[in-house]
Amino acid sequence: MNEYGKTHSIASSKKVNTQIKACVHDAMDDGAIQLDFTKKSKITGHAGKDSSMKFLDANDMTNLIKYLKLDINARHVTKMMGIVALYTGARFAEIAGLTWKDISPDFGTISINKAWNTLDNSGFKETKNEQSKRIIRANPELFALLAQYRDTQKFLHINNPLDLIFMGPNGKVPSSNAANNMLHTALRNINASKDITFHGLRHTHASYLIYKGVSIYYISQRLGHANYTITMNIYSHMLHEMESAENSKLVAALNDLNGAQQHIAERPVQRHL
């Protein structure tokens, strides 16, 4: 854990430590090992990125979508995955696990009901939690781009027995590393104001909806969070900014009300003879 912590955040170290402990406890239950060597492990790592560094602003988001749309092609799977992430806010594993039957252009929906095991590319797995199984709305633009992408997939005659949307020409679903590498290159090419990971596209989607005034409860359901408190905690900095803006609007509105009352009081009284 000390070595891992040198290059990862404390939050990432905690997740890995939890997974290791679970494996060790399973091994102890099976009698494979006797000693719980994780019992006194210490979590190390750096503070991690500031929350504002994990997502793109609206201008960079728009430019990134324009850039990715220039190359809708099943030879470059990760670019289409990036577009889906920006338009839906879905997790990478959820996007990787999408099949064509999950897409319903006629109803304007996408069904997220499973995920892909991206660690070893071994197949489908359960979603992160039950709330992650959801049906979300999507815009017509996304369905049009997916249709264009599907045409190129058919043209390439890719071996795709599971009918996966994001099966590559090599017969494999791209790894998260491949998606991150694509994104880093794309962000450099559009001269983005910051560099983020593929998971940051999920934060970008949510942040955009928050700034557009979409309900935090709706966003929480759309993202597949276990409860809306998680959403509130993740995006608290933006909610505080919006609260400050709303307070300013409130004061202005009340001042306008006072001005209207004063205007009424000053209006000359008309007498009817």
Image (cartoon, grey):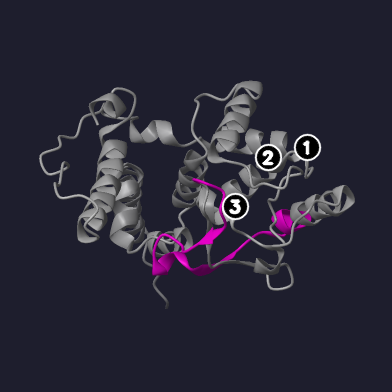
Residue 247, image x and y in percent? Answer: 29, 48
Choose between 34 and 89: the one closer to the eye: 34
Residue picked out by circle 3? 96
Task: Please give the name of the residue rendered at 65% of the width and 33% of the height, measured from the top-left corner.
Answer: 63
Asked if residue 126 is among those painted magenta in the image, a careful observer would answer yes
Choose between 232 and 185: the one closer to the eye: 185
Spatial separation of the CA atoms under disc 2 and disc 1: 7 Å
Q: Is residue 200 above or below residue 233?
A: above
Q: Is residue 127 above or below residue 5?
A: below
Residue picked out by circle 2? 79
Numbered label attached to residue 71: 1
Left or right placement of residue 217 versus residue 123 in this view: left
Which image quadrant for residue 260? bottom left
Extreme front residue here?
32
The answer to which of marks 1 and 3 sits earlier in the sequence is 1
- Residue 90 in sight in this render: no
Left or right placement of residue 180 versus residue 259 in this view: right
Task: Please give the name of the residue rendered at 59% of the width and 57% of the height, measured from the top-left corner.
Answer: 97
Image: magenta residue range: 119-144
- Tag 3 secondary structure: helix
Spatial separation of the CA atoms under disc 2 and disc 3: 12 Å
Amino acid type of the residue tagged 3 in the rendering: Ala
